[in-house]
Amino acid sequence: MHYSEDDEIISIFLEETKDHLIILEDGILKLENQSVDANSNLIESLFRAAHSIKAAANLLKMKNIEAISHELENILDIGRQGSWVVDSNTVNGFLKGIDMIKEMLEFRQYSDEINAEALIQLLRSLIK
């Protein structure tokens, strides 16, 4: 099934993804310059939000949204291991990922035509 085939599924995806993006945005801002260990429940919540976006985008064949949310999930997985430095570069990169997903939701019929490779590489660089 291609995502344009079922408006009800798309509507649910959009609503849930917007909710997950709010969780991600609010959460990453709370984590900036804080101890990761003290916020493990928050990191777990953020990880679940990114994972949910990734899984739904995969089902709907929205490859760019899936790829970006996968990289956000990878960053959060580092945080779950307790070896994450949440500095301003990390926060800015993370927020760029969230903003790109928002843009892709707004123009979802063209989301896979948007070149997201530079952003994906930026997000990958945050975990090296």
Image (cartoon, helix red, strand yellow):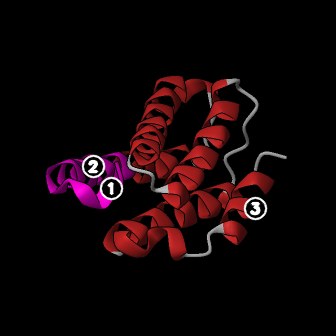
Q: x, y (%) of residue 13?
A: 27, 49
Disc 2/disc 1 C-alpha distance (Å): 10 Å
Residue 52 lies left or right of residue 7; in this view the side is: right
Relative to residue 81, is residue 103 drawn left or right?
left
Q: Nearer the viewer, residue 79 or 37?
A: 79
Q: Which residue is mark 1?
A: 3
Asked if 30 appears above or below 55 in the picture, the reply is: below
The mark that comes first in sequence, 3 or 2, is: 2
Looking at the picture, which amino acid does disc 2 mark? Phe
Question: For residue 91, which quarter of the picture?
Answer: bottom right
Q: Nearer the viewer, mark 3 or mark 1?
A: 1
In the rendered structure, the answer to whether residue 116 lies left or right of residue 118 reads left
Q: Amino acid at mark 1?
A: Tyr
Q: CA distance from mark 3 to mark 2?
A: 26 Å
Q: Earlier in the sequence, mark 3 or mark 1?
A: 1
Q: Amino acid at mark 3?
A: Gln
Which numbered marker is on residue 121? 3
Circle nearer the N terminus (2, 1): 1
The residue where tag 2 is placed is: 13
Seen at 56% across and 25% down, the residue is 38
Q: Which residues are magenta?
A: 1-22
Which mark is nearer the camera, 2 or 1? 1
Q: Is residue 93 magenta?
A: no
Residue at (49%, 52%) from the top-left corner? 29
Q: Is residue 57 left or right of residue 113?
A: left
- Whether pointer 2 and pointer 1 mark residues with C-beta atoms closer than 8 Å, the reply is yes
